[in-house]
Image: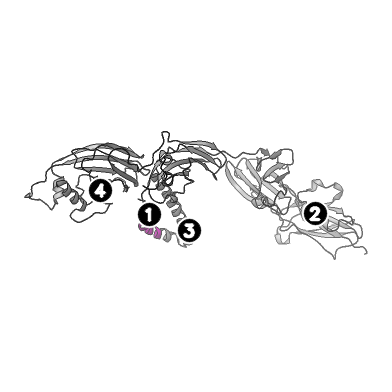
Amino acid sequence: MSLSWLAVALLCGPLGPVPLGAMAPENEVPLRPTTWLLEDKVTPIHLPKGKTRRFYFTLKKKTPSMSLTVSPCGAPIEWTLAARTLKDKPPKNLHWSSKKSMPEVWWRGPGTEAKIHTYTGNSADTYTGPAYAPASIYILRLKSQEQDTSASVYLHEGHGSSGAFPKLPADPRVHTLGVGLTSVSLSWNPSSSVTQPSHSAKHLHDYCILVNRNHNYRSLCAAREGIKKERERDWKREKKDKQRKETVWPILKDWWWQQWDTYGEIQPSTSAASDDFAELGCTCRGVESVCTVSELLPDTQYYFDVFVIDKLNGTSAAYTGTFARTHEEAQPAVIALKEGEPRLVALQDGRGSSSSGSGRQQGATVFSFRPRGWQQNGLLTLQSCNGTQKMKVVVTSRGKVLSTQEVGEQLAQIWLQGGPSYLIRLESSEASAVTGRARLAVKIQASSAYHRQAAPVLPATLQMKSFNKLRSCNSVTLAWMGTEERSLYCVYQRRLSDNEGKDAAVRGSTDRCLGPETRPDSERVLCKYFQELNPRRAVTTAVIGGLEPGASYLLDVYLMRRWGIPIKYHSKTVRTRREC
């Protein structure tokens, strides 16, 4: 009778039922924060840092034994189970020195408390033992010293297992069957809860495989809390970036959102393990004890955890997780670029090859270059030989990416600065890869740039113009754009047959990788230096004489540079007058 009266008084108190999250100091009577544990039910608990939570329960009469399971969610916790024996009620005519309730006086009266079990750690722990015969009430105390966290508690009365938690095999380890470039195959011994003869066993249990790059989780609760925190960090980061972009006054913005965040912080989840497991994002889900995780990054370490879930009771058990590192991509051979030496590179279907006898390598083609001089500056020049095809070039130094760009129809110049040596990686771009087996070619040259601070200036346009009024029977006049730097320009001519016609200019424009070194000396007409500091007036002309009347000629102009490969202007087809 006295025990029932105490239970009602502790549960309700003088002011009625009390919320679950209330706290009480260690030496005070827990009247208002009284919380009772229910039998055969998962109880989620939120544990603020440094504060002790207390839970109470009693056992039914003649209960021979009990089991109590506490599952921390990530952070280590301390929990103890004690049994308190209460004696007779105090006399009713007792005079009070202050307002106190009868349960409080009873609690502070004579009684003994015995500690039954204690544990500290972040793994699930279960106490199983006989009922404490003289106990009037059991007290469960939980405390987190490191951080705010959560835990779940499950109470079961009687002999044997409660059957609420899935069973793990004798060997609960997760085994790695195979590791690839972007995939890992796993296996584990099946749980007897899944393989039991019961027809509904496979429908009530599932395996859930989680993958992350941080660490293994000891429980599904810890995994849920870790995933939730990571999503919160991502959400806050995106929110902060968005605010920074949209807010005109950053100082006022930071103050405003700091005030808002103090009221809008997301509270830690206290949901039970029976919540929707789909939020976890299981890589594999089902009753099969094998799984192949794909779409991973190469040369990256991943952690794999397997949980067996009881969907009926909302409980789970964790296997001993494992980790594996995916294979590293095969690195192509590195080809050293010589000072000022042009090299022709061909790519086809994502496979690189060099025309200078280096052979064909899988993946991209990689070059290395070490500039001369103490300044360690260099100029990388790339010229696509196919006007409709594009290539991607990535320049790195000491593991840091310095430049990434596509090389198309226009000549590309990349200024090398900041490292003693450079790696240049060439590969076909995604846009070019979808066009099929088209052969891609690019001309590349690297040279040391002494006493220069930037890449040379390129002409505004590579088009040439011929003047019809200045055309005669044995000469034509050409004009083209130059640069503000003093450079050498060389003009080449080739007489066309009657069958070639205007198509020769089109073919000449597509052969941009053919430099002046491929032309015979007899085709060179003249070479001249030109410089104009005003870019708008940087136009130079040349009169090409000694031509035959009524004949067609293909004219080419090359910009000969000290640094970088020669630049070829677009070919021009001209025809002299028949009569003058």
Q: Measure the C-alpha gap from mark 3 to mark 4.
A: 46 Å
Q: Which residues are magenta?
A: 255-267
Query: Based on the displayed image, in which of its 4 quarters is residue 356 positioned?
Result: top right
Query: Is there CB contact under 8 Å for labels 2 and 4?
Result: no
Q: Measure the C-alpha gap from mark 3 to mark 1.
A: 19 Å
Q: Measure the C-alpha gap from mark 1 to mark 4.
A: 27 Å
Residue drawn at the location 26% of the way across and 51% of the way down: 22
Residue drawn at the location 82% of the way across and 57% of the way down: 503
Disc 4 residue type (three-letter): Trp
Specify the label residue 534 is tagged with. Answer: none
Q: Which residue is mark 3?
A: 242
Circle 3 or circle 4, nearest the eye? 4
Q: Measure the C-alpha gap from mark 2 to mark 1.
A: 67 Å
Callout 1 environment at 10 Å: few (<14), some (14 to 19), or many (20+)?
A: few
Quadrant for the C terminus in the image:
bottom right
Callout 4 environment at 10 Å: few (<14), some (14 to 19), or many (20+)?
A: some
Secondary structure state at the residue bearing disc 3:
helix
Q: Which residue is mark 4?
A: 36
Query: Is there CB contact under 8 Å for labels 3 and 1?
Result: no
Q: Which residue is mark 1?
A: 266
